[in-house]
Amino acid sequence: MMSLALQLGNIVDTIFVSNLISVDAMSAVTMSLPVETVVQLTGYCLGIGGSIAVGNMLGRRDKESASKLFSATFLVTLVVGLIFSFCAFPTAEPIARILVPDGSILTDYTRDYIRISMLGAPVIGIGLMMVNYLGVENHPELASTYLVLANVINLVLDYIFLRFTPLGITGASLSTVLGFLFAMFVFLFYVRSDKRNLHFVRLKVKDFVIIKEAIVTGIPMLVFMATSFVKALGLNTIIMNQIGEEGMAVFTVCDNVLLIVEMLTGGIIGVIPNVAGILFGEKDYIGIHVLCKKMLKYSYLVLAMVFIFVMTFTEQITILFGSDGGELGTQMVHALRIFIFCVVPYLWNKFIVSYYESIEETTIASFVTFLENAVALLPATFTGIYIWKQIDRIGINGIAAGFIATEIITVAATWIFRKIKHKNSTFYIVPDKNPGINLDFSIRSSMDETQNVHRKIIEFCRERGVSANKANLAAVCAEEMTVNIIKYGGKTSNWIDINLCLEEDLCRLRIRDNGIIFNPLEYKHDSEEFDIHGIELVKKISKSMDYIRAIDMNNTIISF
């Protein structure tokens, strides 16, 4: 729902601008994307990197360091935002002339739009940063509420400013900033929450060294934002130089249709990195196969409906985005009908990135990202426009052809890259079968059910011929861990999932719960109120112990 609200907000925003101002104003929003990316960079990267690092610190129950990092990233994001605000008036004009060098009305629209975006950088940066921290602080509902509310306010103010005031495109940019600002009252619920672990603390200069934790963890997002910047700037430059403002208008419509596809399928594909990562860690390879097949099935069913809709109502869609039905409208219709064919391989590439990241094949995922966003896209778009110009002397359809070529090239190149990197492997890379023999069961977070844990594991091991000593170790560890989860897991802990896998001479016990964030590997005795002696016993009698926090759940794996 959060993804839906974000994408829908962007799309409706563009529709308002194109219909209530002009198609040139709509193009200016697209021309401003490189600046928008830079404005959001600090909040996104420090928010994501900082929230992951803070999650690890809270797992160690190191609330002091976690609060220091939270405070440091907040201050840095705020200061960087204020620098953007200070530079807004003197730099907006030169930046706009770099993005749109012909000095047309499009240049003026771009200048006005990015000026307000830069002025609102502190608000946007803090908003994006806080959304990520709310997630790690067990308040994902507040993060969703903030983003949905910010977009609703944005759309309402868009209509008011554009319809009833002379602000023009300045009003469109201002409505976005005010949406982020007014929705911040949601953060008051977090400040007053009794589940809150992070607080603002007074920092010394040397304390800011801790921010490197957020920077290192946020590097993947930095890479993505960098490629997004290159993509936006490169496409804008190519289209403006080769075609002009009409080309930008057509590209903006096509890009928004791509947002619709992502809006409807992104939530389905988004399940993969959340769930497949856990399945991979648990070596549930059959589960991974089933998950991926279902996600692809649902995604392509939705995509088929979108494809039919776009091909049937192409003209109406272009009119919705401000087309007057003239020559430009005709060009939009033709280009959009060609462009829509790129969504089939586009969805596959999005799936590939999500899947390979989940099974720790980040090299392949990064290869797809770089190829799709810059290495293949920019040359393919330039070539497509050049070739199509030889056909109709306009070249607009070449934009659509370039996107189709990019997605197909990415699919083919990724297949070749995977074959080279993993010879004789299937697409999934992981095995087709799960290792070992498994016992799976769940219990409620109730002390009355803990006695069943010991009994079920002993019976399972006896039936499989496991030594009494090893069976007793597994049963004792499972019972100790479940008791601690029930005692200290908090209000959110409702169920505990237990899996015991027998694999050759190895017994692997996996315990999963949805209680408070807690990493048993980094537990240190810090008070009589939170003194978990059983964890030390488990560490002593087991061969190894691993932990990960995913899908807002603690996953602990113990081997014997």
Image (spheres, grey):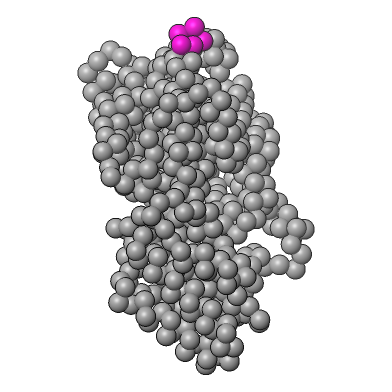
Q: Residue at x 66, y 82 (%)?
A: 504
Whether residue 89 appears in magenta in the rendering, the answer is yes
- Residue 401 in percent (x, y) is at 60, 41
Q: Is residue 408 visible?
A: no
- Residue 231 in percent (x, y) is at 59, 33
Q: Is residue 529 visible?
A: yes
Asked whether, in this view, residue 215 is left or right of residue 416, the answer is: left
Query: Which of the image's four quarters has the C terminus?
Result: bottom right
Q: Where on the picture, by quarter, is residue 508?
A: bottom right
- Residue 325 in percent (x, y) is at 38, 31
Q: Residue at x 44, y 42 (%)?
A: 63
Residue 231, above or below 31:
below
Q: Where on the picture, by quarter, is residue 232?
A: top right
Q: Residue furthest top?
A: 90
- Front-lying residue, 235 or 133: 133
- Front-lying residue, 386 or 168: 168
Asked whether, in this view, residue 409 is left or right of residue 99, the answer is: right
Give, as a single range, the part of the protein colored magenta.
Answer: 86-91
Residue 267, above or below 44:
below
Q: Residue at x 34, y 43 (%)?
A: 196
- Residue 280 in percent (x, y) is at 57, 64
